[in-house]
């Protein structure tokens, strides 16, 4: 194998603009540019938020797998995101600062750091750049000045964007006319059940209900570009502007930062499916207004592809920060669950499907991860060379054992098919299990698969997966010592002592798993830390 014949599946991605799967080609040769709406740092990210970044990371890794270089921007929203999406309520950051009697800057720094920790724990590649909204306020004012004369009007409360001044406003959220205007000839692809489910989950009714009638708005969907500080109030974050002291609107931030760092149009804009309803249509309207090319270039939106992950839900519905009681990655780790088990849980579902979070689901993902890690550890113990540690697809193509070629092809086809990770994972498992292949060659393929999936299998070991639940009183060393004492008692046929030791361990939350097929021997029950 000397050419690209085994990594040939054309990359096809679902574009929310057309609601169709389309062949992907970057605007610049061999280089893709992605912008991902980042977190609002007034609280810890919940597991649902993090699903959005596992999705983006899978997208980025797939582009890398396909041989493209990638520039990826994630922003940090530290100003402007209101408690209601419709320009009503408080700024989330201001409200959090008031509730905790801390400075907004301290709050933003704390939760930004926590978010970056989550990203690292999930083995998500760091973006090429983090853009912080408050660093871009002068550019936001400039942007607003340019569009204000033809697209905005001023009220006592701020500067508002008149959505009737751009064609097909809100089309991304589901306007048929808009979709056909943007559907390219090459679109192809059919609208599958996944799309229908995604449409349902977008929760349009809820989005519509959030449109708040700010007094004086020309259209209910008009949104704030600039929010003036109320005369009686001193905000912690406010800037001078041609429209008075105030703060930028949330939607403006992403238009400005994406343009500043990537240029318009860039390739792919990502976010959760809730953003398909308001935030992204508003960004598109601003981008159209700014480029002034709404008539000449009806297809202009600022990005060629708009991609959205579906929700992580729990039994009570969509997981959200504002609802409270959300589960963070930190709380999962405190319960003794390795964070990559959550990544694996996400990869087990297609990004456009709803995913239900449950303790059982994540425990099953942890077991699946243990099997993967132990399988790879077993192979590593028998490996001779080290070439597999940084696999390159060209090396792989040239050296792959013929029996592994179908696995490589199927894996390539799966991730190229709109990131079908649920189809790719069993192929990884097959690669670990396949018999009568030199170990180094298997490892080489496994490492390449893992570069796309991001489970860190090359370095992760069994011991890494044993996280100590935060509330557990007993340490792993003490458990191992007790188990040794128990093994000795059993060897002496002192079953009374053996049972006594086991009961004492159970009382401390240790599940002793005699005969565990994974040879895991013991585990601390999840309930200990949760
Ligand atoms: P936020 O911090 O609220 O701006 O959200 C950060 C990202 O998480 C955005 O892309 C949201 O669309 C996404 N998101 C919010 N809730 C969920 C959820 N339950 N499941 C998946 N993605 C979500
Ligand atoms: Zn955004």
Image (spheres, rainbow, N blue to C red):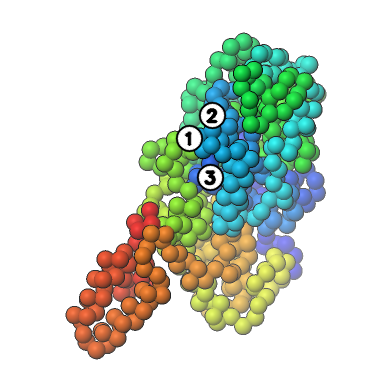
Classify mark 3: helix, strand or loop: loop
Residue at horizontal 38%, vertical 59%? 471
Crowd class of label 2 (few under 14; some 14 to 19; many from 20; radius 10 Å): some
Determine the quadrant in which ligand 1 lies: top right
Write down the residue under mark 1: 322
Mark 1 CB near ligand 1 (8 Å cut): no
Classify mark 1: helix, strand or loop: loop
Write down the residue under mark 3: 45
Mark 3 CB near ligand 1 (8 Å cut): yes
Q: Position of residue 357 (x, y in %)?
A: 42, 47
The mark nearer the N terminus, 3 or 2, is 3
Mark 2 CB near ligand 1 (8 Å cut): no
Front-most of residues 198 and 134:
134
Q: Position of residue 437 (x, y in %)?
A: 56, 77
Write down the residue under mark 2: 83
Q: Position of residue 410 (x, y in %)?
A: 58, 59
Q: Are the residues at dot 1 and dot 2 in contact (C-beta closer than 8 Å)? A: yes
Please tell me whether residue 299 is drawn above or below residue 514 in the rendered image: above
Please tell me whether residue 160 is drawn above or below residue 135 in the rendered image: above
Q: Position of residue 439 (x, y in %)?
A: 57, 78
Front-most of residues 118 and 162:
118
The mark nearer the N terminus, 1 or 2, is 2
């Amino acid at each position: 194998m000397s050419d690209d014949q085994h990594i040939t599946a054309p990359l096809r991605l679902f574009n929310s603009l057309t609601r169709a799967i389309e062949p992907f080609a970057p605007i610049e040769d061999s280089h893709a540019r992605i912008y991902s709406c980042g977190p609002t740092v007034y609280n810890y990210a919940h597991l649902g938020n993090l699903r959005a970044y596992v999705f983006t990371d899978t997208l980025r890794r797939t582009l890398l797998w396909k041989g493209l270089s990638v520039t990826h921007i994630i922003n940090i929203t530290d100003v402007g995101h209101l408690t209601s999406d419709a320009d009503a309520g408080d700024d989330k950051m201001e409200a959090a600062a008031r509730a905790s009697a801390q400075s907004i800057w301290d709050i933003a720094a704390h939760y930004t750091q926590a978010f970056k920790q989550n990203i690292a724990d999930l083995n998500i590649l760091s973006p090429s750049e983090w853009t912080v909204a408050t660093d871009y306020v002068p550019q936001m004012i400039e942007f607003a000045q340019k569009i204000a004369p033809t697209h905005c009007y001023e009220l006592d409360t701020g500067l508002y964007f008149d959505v009737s001044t751009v064609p097909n406003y809100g089309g991304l959220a589901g306007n048929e006319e808009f979709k056909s205007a943007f559907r390219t000839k090459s679109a192809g692809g059919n609208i599958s059940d996944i799309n229908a489910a995604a449409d349902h989950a977008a929760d349009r009714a809820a989005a519509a209900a959030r449109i708040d009638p700010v007094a004086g708005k020309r259209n209910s969907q008009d949104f704030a570009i600039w929010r003036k500080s109320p005369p009686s109030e001193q905000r912690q974050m406010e800037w001078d502007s041609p429209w008075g002291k105030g703060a930028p609107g949330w939607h403006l931030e992403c238009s400005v930062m994406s343009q500043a760092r990537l240029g318009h149009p860039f390739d792919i804009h990502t976010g959760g499916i809730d953003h398909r309803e308001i935030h992204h249509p508003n960004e598109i309207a601003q981008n159209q207004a700014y480029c002034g090319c709404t008539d000449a270039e009806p297809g202009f939106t600022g990005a060629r592809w708009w991609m959205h992950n579906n929700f992580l839900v729990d039994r009570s519905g969509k997981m959200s920060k504002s609802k409270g009681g959300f589960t963070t990655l930190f709380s999962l780790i405190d319960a003794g669950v390795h964070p990559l088990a959550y990544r694996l849980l996400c990869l087990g579902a297609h990004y456009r499907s709803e995913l239900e979070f449950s303790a059982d689901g994540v425990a099953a993902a942890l077991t699946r991860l243990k099997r993967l890690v132990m399988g790879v550890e077993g192979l590593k113990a028998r490996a001779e060379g080290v070439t597999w540690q940084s696999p390159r697809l060209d090396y792989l193509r040239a050296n792959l054992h013929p029996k592994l070629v179908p696995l490589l092809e199927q894996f390539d086809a799966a991730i190229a098919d709109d990131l079908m990770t649920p189809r790719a994972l069993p192929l990884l498992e097959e690669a670990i299990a396949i018999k009568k292949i030199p170990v180094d060659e298997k490892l080489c393929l496994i490492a390449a698969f893992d570069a796309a999936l991001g489970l860190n299998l090359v370095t992760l070991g069994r011991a890494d997966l044993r996280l100590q639940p935060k509330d557990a009183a007993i340490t792993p060393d003490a458990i191992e010592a007790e188990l040794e004492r128990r093994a000795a008692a059993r060897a002496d046929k002192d079953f009374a002592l053996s049972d006594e030791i086991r009961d004492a361990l159970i009382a401390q939350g240790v599940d002793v798993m005699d005969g565990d097929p994974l040879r895991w021997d013991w585990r601390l029950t999840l309930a200990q830390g949760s």
